[in-house]
Image (cartoon, rainbow, N blue to C red):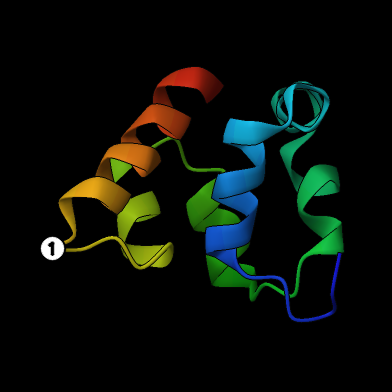
Amino acid sequence: MSATATAQDAVYQTLTDESYLNAFQTDPEAALEGYDLTAEETEALTSGDDLTVKTVAGDEGDVNRADVSVTIIVRIR
């Protein structure tokens, strides 16, 4: 994973990598350590709130990307 991995990358990885999804479900903060995220992004991604995740992952107004974020929220809960 590159040093510039983003919140979008983290969301995508939870959708495409079952072992990462399991790690995220077990300890989200630890799973996100490899990403270059601000404290606010980490808090948002672990919040369980779909609008918050969409905002942080840059999904506002983009239906396809918004669907991805909603999917990740459902899978994490």
Expressed as whole percent of the image width and height from the top left, the position of residue 43 reads 56, 56
The answer to whether residue 32 shows anywhere in this view is yes
Q: Residue at x 55, y 66 (%)?
A: 41
Q: Residue at x 32, y 54 (%)?
A: 54
Left or right: 65 with respect to 24?
A: left
Left or right: 64 with respect to 56?
A: left
Quadrant of the rendered structure where residue 31 is?
Answer: top right
Expressed as whole percent of the image width and height from the top left, the position of residue 2 reads 84, 74
Q: Is 18 drawn above or below residue 37 in the view shown?
A: above
Counting the numbered discs, the total is 1
Q: Amino acid at mark 1?
A: Gly
Expressed as whole percent of the image width and height from the top left, the position of residue 35 reads 77, 65
Q: Residue at x 73, y 33 (%)?
A: 24
The answer to whether residue 77 shows anywhere in this view is no
Dividing the image into 4 quarters, which one contains the N terminus?
bottom right
Left or right: 18 with respect to 48?
A: right
Q: Is 69 drawn above or below residue 22 in the view shown?
A: below
Residue nearest the viewer, comparing 67 with 49: 67
Identify residue for label 1: 61
Q: Is 42 drawn above or below residue 31 in the view shown?
A: below
Q: Residues within 10 Å of mark 1 (few under 14, many from 20)?
A: few
Q: Residue at x 64, y 53 (%)?
A: 10
Residue nearest the viewer, comparing 44 with 64: 64
Circle 1 SS class: loop
Q: Residue furthest bottom?
A: 4
Expressed as whole percent of the image width and height from the top left, the position of residue 21 reads 71, 27
Q: Is 66 drawn above or below residue 24 in the view shown?
A: below
